[in-house]
Image (tube, rainbow, N blue to C red):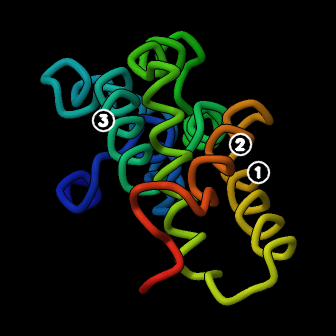
Amino acid sequence: MLTKLTAQARSRHELAEALRKRNVPDEVGDRVLDRMTEVGLVDDAAFAESWVTSRQSRRHLSKTALRQELVRKGVDREQIDGALEQVEPEDEYDAALALARKKARTTAGLDPVVRRRRVAGALARRGFGSDVTRRALAEALDPNADDSLDTP
């Protein structure tokens, strides 16, 4: 159990699942997790905030994608909402633009229509909405931008 916590932060739900896989009775697992929560080793609100910060900056995910990941990890809706409050619209746009620029660099030799479609697809798969995608595409694929994306 502590090994799981030291390797990476985990939600209470994830730890409960790990205990179930080891055939620990639910009532024993609940007591262990309650005690870990009391001493601060398990804190879903802090986990969600850390997850949002990390995943948005490293993986360039939208609020929608972050919400889905936290739901899969069993984090409570209120805690998810609290963690996502820290993401400003401009932060989400910056993440979309970073992803669009990265994808634009890797598709530099393609036909412009294909290139645009691939960059837009990457943004859509990360959960960005149409307005954010449109803005990021315009800036990342603009041939007159300061930072030329056509050169490696």
- Distance in Å between CA atoms under marks 1 and 2: 8 Å
- Distance in Å between CA atoms under marks 2 and 3: 25 Å
**Quadrant, the C terminus:** bottom left
The image position of residue 27, as x and y in percent, is: 47, 31
The image position of residue 53, as x and y in percent, is: 34, 37
The answer to whether 122 appears left or right of 26 in the picture is right
How many marks are shown on the rendered structure?
3
Which numbered disc flags the more N-terminal residue, 2 or 3? 3
Amino acid type, mark 3: Ser
The answer to whether 41 appears left or right of 88 in the picture is left
Cβ atoms under marks 3 and 1 closer than 8 Å: no
Identify which residue, 28 or 18, lies in the foreground: 18
The image position of residue 139, as x and y in percent, is: 58, 48
The mark closer to the camera, 1 or 2, is 2
The mark closer to the camera, 3 or 1, is 1
The image position of residue 143, as x and y in percent, is: 59, 63
Cβ atoms under marks 1 and 2 closer than 8 Å: yes
- Which residue position is annotated with label 2? 133
Identify which residue, 152 or 64, lies in the foreground: 152
**Quadrant, the N terminus:** bottom left
- Which residue position is annotated with label 3? 50
- Which residue position is annotated with label 1? 124
Cβ atoms under marks 2 and 3 closer than 8 Å: no
Q: Secondary structure at mark 3?
A: helix
Q: Residue sitting at 53 percent across and 58 percent down? A: 99
Q: Would you identify the image quadrant in which residue 119 lies?
A: bottom right
